[in-house]
Image (cartoon, rainbow, N blue to C red):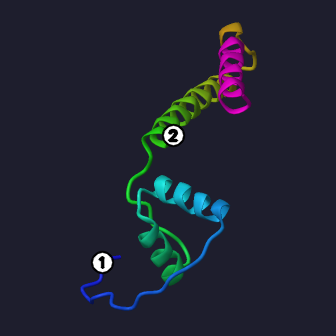
C-alpha cells in the first residue's frame, strides 16, 4: 500500500490497553507497523501480511509431510483388504504426535 501522494491528514485514535495490545500482537504477526495495519483495515477491511512467520512455515511443512504420509497409507490400505501392523503403528504415531502438538 505505497502511495506516492503525501499523507498530510493526521488523525488520532484512542484504544484501551487490551485493544492496543491486541493491535500490536496482530501487527507483529503480520510484520507491519500499527500505522500500516490501521490504514489497511480502514481502506480494504483486511491486512496483507508482508512475510509469513517462520514458525507458521515450519508447522505448514510438518502438516504437509503428515498429510503426504496419511495419503500414502490410505493408498496402501485401498489396494489391500487387510490392514498391516506397520500401517496401524504409523497411524498411531501420527495421532500421538498431533495430540502432543495441538492439544498440549
Residue at image point 50% right, 74% down:
38
Quarter of the view holding residue 50? bottom left
Q: Is residue 38 above or below residue 24?
A: below
Tag 2 residue: 60
Magenta region: 87-104
Decide if residue 93 is on the left or right side of residue 39. right
Mark closer to the chain start, 1 or 2: 1
Q: Is residue 51 above or below residue 95?
A: below
Residue 65 falls within the magenta-colored stretch = no
Residue at image point 54% right, 72% down:
46
CB-based contact (under 8 Å), mark 1 and mark 2: no
Q: Nearer the viewer, residue 47 or 93?
A: 47
Q: Nearer the viewer, residue 90 or 84?
A: 90
Tag 1 residue: 2
Find numbered disc 2 in the image and state the secondary structure of the residue it sits on.
helix
Which quadrant, please, contains the N terminus? bottom left
Where in the figure is residue 58, as x and y percent of width and height?
47, 35
Where in the figure is residue 21, as x and y percent of width and height?
59, 58
**Mark 1 crowd level (few <14, some 14–19, many ≥20, 10 Å Cα):** few
Q: Nearer the viewer, residue 16 or 69?
A: 16
Where in the figure is residue 84, as x and y percent of width and height?
70, 11
Quarter of the view holding residue 54? top left
Q: Nearer the viewer, residue 26 or 97?
A: 26
**Mark 2 crowd level (few <14, some 14–19, many ≥20, 10 Å Cα):** few
Point out the frontmost of discs 1 and 2: 1
Residue 103 falls within the magenta-colored stretch = yes
**Alpha-carbon span between mark 1 and mark 2:** 30 Å
Find numbered disc 1 in the image and state the secondary structure of the residue it sits on.
loop
Amino acid at each position: 500500500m505505497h502511495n506516492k501522494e503525501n499523507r498530510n491528514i493526521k488523525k488520532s485514535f484512542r484504544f484501551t490497553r487490551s485493544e492496543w495490545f491486541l493491535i500490536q500482537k496482530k501487527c507483529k504477526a503480520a510484520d507491519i507497523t500499527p500505522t500500516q495495519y490501521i490504514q489497511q483495515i480502514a481502506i480494504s477491511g483486511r491486512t496483507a501480511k508482508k512475510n509469513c512467520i517462520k514458525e507458521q512455515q515450519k508447522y505448514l511443512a510438518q502438516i504437509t509431510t503428515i498429510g503426504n504420509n496419511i495419503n500414502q497409507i490410505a493408498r496402501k490400505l485401498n489396494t489391500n483388504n487387510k490392514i498391516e501392523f506397520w500401517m496401524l503403528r504409523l497411524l498411531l504415531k501420527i495421532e500421538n504426535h498431533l495430540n502432543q502438538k495441538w492439544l498440549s
